[in-house]
Every structure is written in C-alpha cells, then in structure tokens.
C-alpha cells in the first residue's frame, strides 16, 4: 500500500516534469518506479518524443558546442626591437626620446621600457625597448 502511494506520487511528479518539458528528470523519476504499467507506458512515449542519448540527456545534441576560439585563444607572439639613443652635451635627451617613441609608434611598434645608458664615452644616453605582434 505504501509502495502504491509512493508510485502514485512519483507518477504525479513525472507528469509535472513532462508538462514542463523536463524530460530527462521525468525519465529519471519514472525509472525509480519499477515495473508499473503507467511508468513503462510513459517511458515508451518519452523515448518517442525525446530519445535518450548515451549520457542520459536527450538535449545534448540539440545545443551546438561553442567554437574553439570561445574558450581558447592562441597566444600572441611578439618581436622586439632595441634602440639606443645618445645625446651630446648640448642636446635634449628627453626630446630625442619622445621623437623616437613617436616615430616607432607610427611604424606599428609599442613602447615597452627604457633604461639609462651607462657608458663612459657618451655623457648621456638611453636604451629603448619596443615590441609588436608578429605578422
């Protein structure tokens, strides 16, 4: 008698799930009932309406997988260029650096870093580092 009441409650739950088009959960509930004639009938109808795939979800093949680029992006490879600038005693090193950075940007290079050039032969100088994506 208790089993009958449980089966009836499970059938009602499965009916609601089918009405909501939640076929995979309805199928799972119906399979717990056992050899009940109504449960077997509804499982047969579900197999016609929404056939079960190997994993138990009839909707797996309905949703296309995302394109590979959606979850993996190729790493960007860069090429680097180092430029050395030296200024004489009367020349403005900062202005020379600014002009060189503007020139390199116009050629597609991006400024990365600069370091003071330590050289006993030149009173002042800088080493500039640029990069751009490889073509």
Image: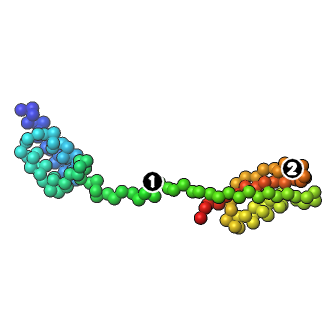
Q: Nearer the viewer, residue 75 or 63?
A: 75
Q: Nearer the viewer, residue 46 or 12?
A: 46
Q: Position of residue 122 (x, y in %)?
A: 89, 53
Residue 13, visible in the rendered structure: no
* Mark 2 and mark 1 residues within 8 Å of each other at the beta carbon: no
- Left or right? Give the position of 65 relative to 132: left
**Label 1: few (<14), some (14–19) or many (≥20) C-alpha neighbours in 10 Å:** few
Residue at image coords 15%, 53%: 47
Disc 1 target residue: 71
The mark total stands at: 2
Residue at image coords 89%, 49%: 120
Q: Is residue 135 above or below residue 57?
A: below
Q: Tell me the quarter of the picture where residue 84 sits.
A: bottom right
Kindly give the residue lying farthest to the right in the view shown: 90
Q: Earlier in the sequence, mark 2 or mark 1?
A: 1
Q: Nearer the viewer, residue 75 or 106?
A: 75
The dot on residue 14 is none
Residue at image coords 19%, 47%: 26
Q: Nearer the viewer, residue 19 or 44?
A: 44
Residue at image coords 76%, 55%: 128
Kindly give the residue lying farthest to the bottom in the view shown: 106
Q: Position of residue 126 (x, y in %)?
A: 81, 54
The dot on residue 119 is 2
Q: Quadrant of the N terminus?
A: top left
């Amino acid at each position: 008698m208790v089993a009958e009441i449980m089966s009836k409650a499970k059938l009602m739950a499965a009916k609601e799930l089918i009405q909501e088009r939640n076929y995979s959960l309805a199928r799972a509930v119906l399979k717990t009932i056992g050899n009940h004639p109504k449960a077997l009938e509804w499982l047969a109808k579900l197999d016609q309406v929404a056939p079960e795939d190997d994993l138990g979800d009839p909707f797996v093949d309905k949703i296309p997988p995302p394109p590979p680029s959606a979850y993996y992006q190729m790493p960007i490879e860069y090429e680097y260029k180092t430029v050395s600038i030296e200024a004489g005693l009367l020349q403005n090193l900062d202005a020379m650096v600014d002009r060189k950075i503007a020139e390199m940007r116009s050629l597609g290079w991006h400024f990365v870093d600069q370091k003071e050039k330590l050289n006993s032969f030149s009173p002042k100088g800088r080493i500039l580092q640029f990069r751009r994506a490889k073509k």
